[in-house]
Image (cartoon, rainbow, N blue to C red):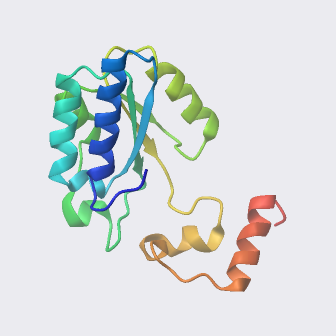
Amino acid sequence: MTTGSLGQGFSCAIGVALASKLRNDGATIYTIIGDGESQEGQIWEAAMFAAHQNLDNLIGFTDYNKLQLDDLVENICSVEPLADKWKAFGWEVIEVANGNDCNQVDEAISSAKVLKKPVMVILNTVKGRGIGFAERAGIYNHSMPVTKEMLEEGLKELRGEF
C-alpha cells in the first residue's frame, strides 16, 4: 500500500501485522521505509508499539542509501547509529552490507523469519544502482526528469548491453 505523509505506511504495516497475529493466520508482513523517513517521529512511535506487541511476524527494511530529497541524510538530521536505535526500541536488527544484492537480501529475510521479535533489515544501498546516470546524479535523482535517450541508456544497462 502507498500512503500519504512519511511514516504512515509503516504504521499501517504494523496494524496489519497486529491483525494477522490476532487472527493467527501465520502471515509475515513486510514493510519498507527510507532513511530520510526514519527522521519522522511517527516511525519511532510505531516501532515502540510493534516491539511492545511482540510483532514477530513483522520484517521491516530500511533503504539506507544515505540520501534524501534535499541533501545527505547526515546533513539534514543524522539517524546514526541507526542499528542501535532499532535495538533500543526492542527490535532485532540485521545489517546487509550490499542491499542492492538480491542474494544478500534473501539471506537476511531467511534469518529474520526465525527471530522472535520484529526485525529491521538495514539495507546499505546505492540510490539508482544499475543505471549510470541515476547513480551519478546522487541526491538529484530523487525527482529528476528522464529523457528518452536516458531511458534507452538505462534499459541497455539493465539488459547488460554496455
Quadrant location of residue 52? top left
Q: Nearer the viewer, residue 29 or 59?
A: 29
Quadrant location of residue 13? top left
Left or right of 130 on screen, residue 18: left
Q: Nearer the viewer, residue 106 or 12?
A: 12
* Furthest residue toward right: 161
What residue sits 47% from the left and 70% below the top?
Answer: 138
Residue 5: image location, x then y, percent: 27, 61
Q: Using the rendered image of the protein, determine whether residue 92 is visible from the camera's viewpoint.
A: no
Residue 121: image location, x then y, percent: 41, 35
Left or right of 70 on screen, residue 81: left
What residue sits 24% from the left and 34% below the top?
Answer: 86
What residue sits 53% from the left and 42% below the top?
Answer: 98
Q: Nearer the viewer, residue 73 or 60?
A: 60
Q: Using the rendered image of the protein, determine whether residue 70 is visible from the camera's viewpoint.
A: yes
Q: Nearer the viewer, residue 23 or 108?
A: 23
Left or right of 83 on screen, residue 156: right
Residue 93: image location, x then y, percent: 34, 28
What residue sits 51% from the left and 27% below the top?
Answer: 109
